[in-house]
Image (cartoon, rainbow, N blue to C red):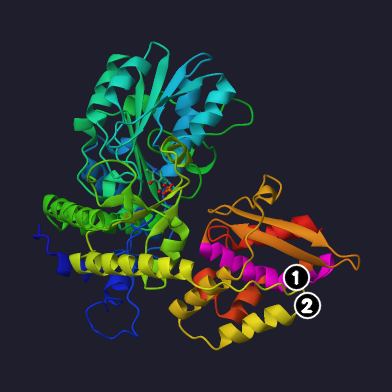
């Protein structure tokens, strides 16, 4: 095992390493400061190279054929299971089920375990800070069975409240679901106590380890949880691979989830089909074989380094970033105290999260804004969303310095922009306005200048009367609040009024509306927003999607005008 050396560790990640320009002094080189590791991590060379090597050398289906290639593929696939078993200290390979990711692992549990242990009137306890993936599958099964969900709240620091847990836990509680670490708050929940108490009450425990697994060693036998789920892609592995760990006796007693392929023992049209033993009973169909093999490489990669040192370094990053953010006067943390893993959530007073995140992106800094798939948590904290910085062991103190300095600059620029002169434009001439915008953008080359131009355009948008901002005009699917109303002329062409609480969305509204103003329903329906954004040179950074609001705006306009 090697000592953990941050700079040496970083060199394994080509996407991170080749974009390390922050100290080069060359302003024309845009660095990528990747602080969105909670969503997915970058991949080391060992994982990247494993995928083509698998397809070039040993590709075959697993467990099925009697030929040599299939035997090689099966061996690599089953060795990967052994690697993961050892990594999380499970008792047996039978306890490691391959899935597509955390979400699929929880869906499997909700469906299969839910059917096994829940009856009408039973209760499931889950924390208010859970990711949607650990809420919605339970809501669906609870509704089907007539069970109910009890919600566990948090203490001021953002960890689940153990006192409240004592009052929620009853004889009716059959399943307790809790994230080891919330993907927004970065605090380690007291799951050892939760598991002990749940066990004493006869309830089964499901721990969502999607965030925890990437940051510190996990021992499922020491935890004594019944189930532990996580995704490969959040711990330097490929996308499309996940793990469901479960105690063998429980998995054995559960009915199959999906059927077909590898999960059967015997199929007959005349007598009942019988199912394969663990772990195959839960692995219907051809799995992501190359992904599983590449995932084992990610685990070997982590295992090369002293895991405690890696965790310690990440905690130092978390502390450093938290302290630096605390010194920025308008930063408000959404819960009290420093995080346990390098995931920090905050808002900036007086500014929309989306505006700050897109401005930072124009300086090459990738952080996340929005509800982070934790809408109940946002509601509980009475915020519409927040910013999240989530770091990994390849991030550096230099990057944090660059991020903090840029954040301070961006907040200042946002303030200055709000004070500037505003000229409202009302152009209803078909094509004139969009041509003007295309001309303007064609002269600007860099993303940060284009971003500035979008923000300036946003200032030209006439604010909408508050009375018009209602459920009917709301653009749903956009992460910020945005509204649009349509006016139809006697000639059958349309003009629009629109608004948003985010400046970047106001700028995007000006751009999108310029394409639609003065057009007929037919022309609007036929309009290709992708090629418009291509013309504008925005497709690379603002490729129309629901996340940035562009598609949601376009869909709403199309619905309103048809
Ligand atoms: N649970 C938590 C705590 C997460 O952070 C995530 C992803 O962000 C998920 C579940 C869902 O993971 P996946 O999308 O890999 O299935």
Residue 156 % position (x, y) = 29, 34
Is the C terminus in the top left, top right, bottom left or bottom right quadrant?
bottom right
Callout 2: SS: loop
Residue 547 % position (x, y) = 53, 58
Callout 1: SS: loop
Q: Residue furthest bottom?
A: 443
Residue 381 % position (x, y) = 41, 38
**Magenta-colored stretch includes residue 143:** no
Q: From this viewpoint, is residue 378 visible?
A: yes
- Magenta stretch in the rendered image: 503-523
Magenta span: helix, strand or loop, mainly? Answer: helix
The span from disc 2 to disc 1 (Cα, nearest Å) is 7 Å
* Left or right: where 336 falls relative to 262: left
- Whether the residues at callouts 2 and 1 have beta carbons within 8 Å, the answer is yes
Q: Is residue 258 above or below residue 57?
A: above
Residue 517 - label: 1
Residue located 36% across and 23% down the image: 204
Q: Please rate how many residues cluster around mark 2, counting C-alpha atoms within 10 Å: few if below 14, some from 14 to 19, many from 20.
A: few
**Magenta-colored stretch includes residue 512:** yes
Q: Please rate how many residues cluster around mark 1, counting C-alpha atoms within 10 Å: few if below 14, some from 14 to 19, many from 20.
A: many
* Left or right: where 528 falls relative to 459: right
Label 1 CB sits under 8 Å from any ligand 1 atom: no
| Pointer 2 residue | 429
* Left or right: where 172 falls relative to 81: right
Is the N terminus in the top left, top right, bottom left or bottom right quadrant?
bottom left
Residue 183 - label: none
* Left or right: where 550 falls relative to 218: right
Q: Which residue is more in the foreground, 508 or 218?
A: 508
Q: Is residue 147 above or below residue 58?
A: above
Q: Residue furthest top?
A: 171
Residue located 57% across and 62% down the image: 545
Residue located 11% across and 54% down the image: 309
């Amino acid at each position: 095992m090697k000592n953990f050396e941050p700079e040496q560790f970083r060199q394994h990640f080509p996407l991170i390493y080749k974009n390390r320009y922050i100290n080069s002094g060359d302003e024309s080189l845009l660095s990528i400061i990747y602080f969105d590791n909670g969503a997915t991590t970058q991949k080391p060379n060992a994982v990247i190279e494993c995928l083509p090597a698998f397809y070039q050398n040993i590709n075959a289906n697993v467990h099925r054929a009697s030929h040599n290639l299939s035997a090689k593929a099966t061996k690599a696939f089953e060795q990967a299971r052994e690697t993961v078993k050892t990594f999380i200290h499970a008792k047996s390979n039978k306890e490691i089920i391959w899935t597509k990711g955390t979400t699929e692992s929880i869906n499997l549990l909700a469906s299969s375990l839910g059917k096994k242990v829940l009856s009408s009137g039973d209760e499931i306890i889950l924390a208010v800070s859970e990711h949607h993936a650990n809420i919605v599958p339970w809501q669906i099964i609870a509704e089907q069975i007539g069970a109910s969900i009890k919600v566990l709240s948090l203490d001021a620091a953002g960890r689940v409240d153990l006192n409240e847990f004592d009052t929620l836990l009853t004889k009716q509680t059959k399943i307790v679901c809790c994230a080891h670490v919330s993907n927004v708050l970065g605090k380690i929940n007291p799951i050892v106590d939760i598991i002990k108490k749940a066990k004493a009450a006869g309830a089964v425990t499901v721990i969502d380890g999607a965030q925890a697994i990437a940051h510190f060693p996990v021992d499922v036998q020491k935890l004594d949880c019944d189930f532990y789920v996580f995704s490969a892609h959040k711990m330097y592995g490929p996308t499309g691979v996940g793990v469901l760990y479960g105690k063998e006796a429980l998995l054995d007693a559960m009915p199959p989830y999906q059927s077909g392929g590898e999960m059967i023992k015997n199929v007959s049209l005349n007598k009942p089909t019988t199912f394969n033993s663990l772990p195959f009973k839960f692995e219907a169909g051809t799995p992501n074989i190359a992904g599983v093999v590449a995932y084992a490489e990610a685990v070997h990669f982590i295992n090369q380094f002293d895991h405690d040192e890696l965790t310690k370094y990440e905690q130092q990053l978390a502390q450093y970033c938290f302290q630096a953010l605390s010194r920025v006067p308008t930063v408000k943390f959404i819960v009290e105290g420093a995080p346990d893993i390098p995931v920090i959530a905050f808002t900036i007073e007086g500014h929309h999260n989306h505006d700050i995140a897109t401005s930072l992106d124009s300086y090459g800094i990738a952080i996340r804004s929005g509800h982070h798939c934790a809408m109940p948590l946002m509601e509980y904290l009475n915020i519409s969303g927040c910013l999240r910085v989530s770091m990994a062991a390849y991030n550096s103190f230099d990057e944090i310095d660059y991020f903090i300095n840029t954040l301070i600059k961006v907040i200042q620029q946002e303030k200055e922009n709000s004070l500037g002169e505003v000229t409202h434009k009302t152009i209803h001439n078909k094509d004139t306005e969009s041509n003007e915008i295309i001309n303007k953008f064609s002269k600007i080359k860099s993303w940060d200048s284009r971003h500035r131009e979008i923000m300036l355009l946003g200032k030209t948008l006439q604010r909408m009367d508050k009375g018009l901002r209602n459920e009917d005009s709301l653009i749903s699917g956009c992460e910020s609040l945005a509204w649009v109303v349509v006016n139809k002329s006697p000639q059958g062409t349309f003009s629009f009024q629109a608004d948003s609480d985010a400046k970047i969305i106001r700028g995007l509204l000006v751009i999108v509306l310029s394409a639609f103003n003065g057009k007929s329903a037919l022309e609007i329906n036929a309009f290709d927003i992708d090629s418009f954004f291509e013309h504008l040179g925005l497709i690379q950074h603002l490729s129309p999607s629901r996340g940035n609001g562009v598609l949601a705006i376009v869909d709403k306009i199309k619905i309103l005008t048809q």
